Amino acid sequence: MRRVLRAPLTLLLVALAAFPAAAAPAGHTAGLVARDVRAHEEARARVEDLREADAPPGEVRDAERHRMDVRSRLWDLLWAVERGLGDPVAVDPAGRAGHCPLGRRSTPPPDAGEDDAWAAPTTGYRLTAGYAERGRHWKHRHTGQDFAVGSGTPVRAVGPGTVRVTTCGDGFGNQVIVRHRDGYFTQYAHLSRIDVRKGQKVRAGQLLGLSGATGNVTGPHLHFEVRITPYIGSAVPPLPWLARKGVHPEQ
Ligand SMILES: [Zn+2]
């Protein structure tokens, strides 16, 4: 697996020793992760500012290298922690050995069209729980944006990318994670059906599956998340990220 090769062995061993399975990440680690997520977003903004200002290419390159370093450190840390905790995205990206109890369509869904404009992940929704809200259903703050929709509503890729994983069995139920060209990942959780496979390229607006109420939920909705890595813990505020892509989900 690529992550094993990328993660320095010492860091991995230290992280695994520090966070055995079933243990919640220690406050210290949560602090490190939060610091790196913030540092990455600051580094990204700096790269964008430099590009906007037509800064010398060397300066842009250095800023971009710094952003990638921060991301790489965060990725290694989260992979080790999430693997220790049994997160299916880290443990078994194929989705519990491919035994998700899902009706998957055998034929790929049709393309959404020629237009690659970014889009909201679903339609006919009401925005409910937002990013970083606290609630009794979550151990910590809410890591995504909830779109209240009935079960069976089409869930679509917000932008072009590649399906990184489809998994089931944990609190997110049936979920799809897509990697986009800018290096960010989007997560679509609690689905009743998944219509894509790992490695599949998707267009903006392409059908990923149908909304549902699988996993840890009290009712049907789409949980949508934007992450710096594929792993839980690296989420950033999703609505500002969508706004940068020209998408403004209505309240
Ligand atoms: Zn949610």
Image (spheres, rainbow, N blue to C red):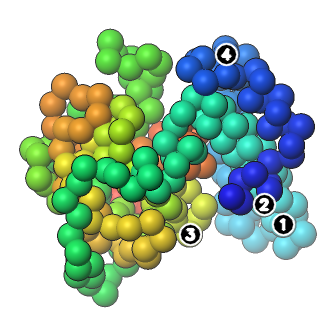
Q: Amino acid at mark 1?
A: Arg
**Which structural element holds mark 4?**
loop
**Which residue occupies the foreground of this view, 225 or 118?**
225
Q: Which residue corresponds to the image point at 68% horizontal and 58% vertical from the top-left?
A: 1
Marks 1 and 3, the one that precedes in the sequence = 1
Taking the image as shown, residue 246 lies to the left or right of residue 249, namely right
User: Which residue is found at the position 33% from the left and 67% from the top?
Assistant: 196
Question: Label 2: which residue?
Answer: 64
> Is residue 159 in view?
yes
Look at the numbered discs 1 and 3 and tell me whether their residues touch, using CB distance below 8 Å.
no
Mark toward the viewer: 3 or 4: 4
Q: Pick whichever of labels 3 and 2 is earlier in the sequence.
A: 2
Residue wearing tag 4: 26
Circle 3 residues within 10 Å: few <14, some 14–19, many ≥20: few
Number of the label disc, if any, that sits on residue 61: 1
**Callout 1 secondary element:** helix
Where is mark 3, residue-wise? 181
Q: Secondary structure at mark 3?
A: loop
Mark 4: few/some/many CA within 10 Å (<14, 14-19, 20+): few
Q: Whole-Å distance between the Cαs marked 3 and 4?
A: 32 Å
Residue 20 % position (x, y) = 67, 22
Using the numbered discs, state the Cα–Cα distance from disc 2 to disc 4 in whole angstroms. Answer: 30 Å
- Which quarter shows the C terminus? top left
Taking the view exactly as shown, the residue that stands out farthest to the bottom is 114
Amino acid type at circle 3 is Arg
Give the amino acid type for the residue marked by disc 4 in the picture: Ala
Q: Give me the C-alpha separation between circle 2 and circle 1.
A: 5 Å
- The residue nearer to you, when weighing 222 against 38, is 222
The picture quadrant where one finds residue 178 is bottom left
Who is closer to the viewer here, 149 or 66? 149
Estimate how packed mark 2 is, as few (under 14), some (14 to 19) or many (20 or more) residues with alpha carbons within 10 Å: some
The location of residue 12, given as percent across then percent down, is 80, 37
